[in-house]
């Protein structure tokens, strides 16, 4: 299982996501990023993906 806390990248956000794998986290976090933070798919840089992956934990 994987867990991601959005606040680890976007200070002040208390959204967390849990899924079986990284793909499941992405499926949940991408719509959240767009709706809550205005981050669209074309704004996701390799650096942002690296930060996102680094913030994920295995539970």
Image: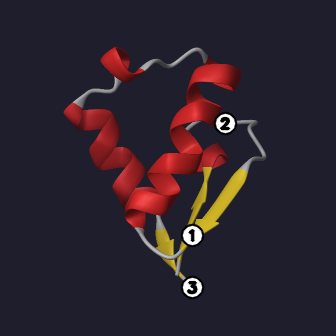
Of 13 and 21, nearer the camera is 21
- List x then y, in percent, for residue 21: 43, 72
Q: Earlier in the sequence, mark 2 or mark 1?
A: 2
In the rendered image, the vertical position of residue 25 relative to residue 38, given as above or below: below
Question: Circle 2 — which element?
Answer: loop
Q: Nearer the viewer, mark 1 or mark 3?
A: 1
Q: Which residue is mark 1?
A: 19
Residue at 57 percent of width and 22 percent of height: 34
- List x then y, in percent, for residue 1: 52, 81
Q: Earlier in the sequence, mark 1 or mark 3?
A: 1
Q: Which quadrant is the C terminus positioned in?
A: bottom right
Q: Callout 1 environment at 10 Å: few (<14), some (14 to 19), or many (20+)?
A: some
Question: Circle 1 — which element?
Answer: strand
- Quadrant position of residue 49: top left
Q: Which residue is mark 2?
A: 11
Numbered badge on residue 59 = 3
In the rendered image, the vertical position of residue 12 relative to residue 8, given as above or below: above
Q: Is residue 31 left or right of residue 47?
A: right
């Amino acid at each position: 299982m994987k867990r991601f806390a959005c606040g680890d990248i976007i200070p002040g956000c208390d959204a967390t996501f849990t899924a079986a794998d990284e793909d499941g986290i992405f499926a949940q976090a991408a719509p959240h990023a767009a709706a809550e933070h205005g981050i669209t798919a074309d704004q996701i840089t390799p650096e942002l993906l690296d930060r996102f992956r680094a913030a994920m934990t295995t539970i």
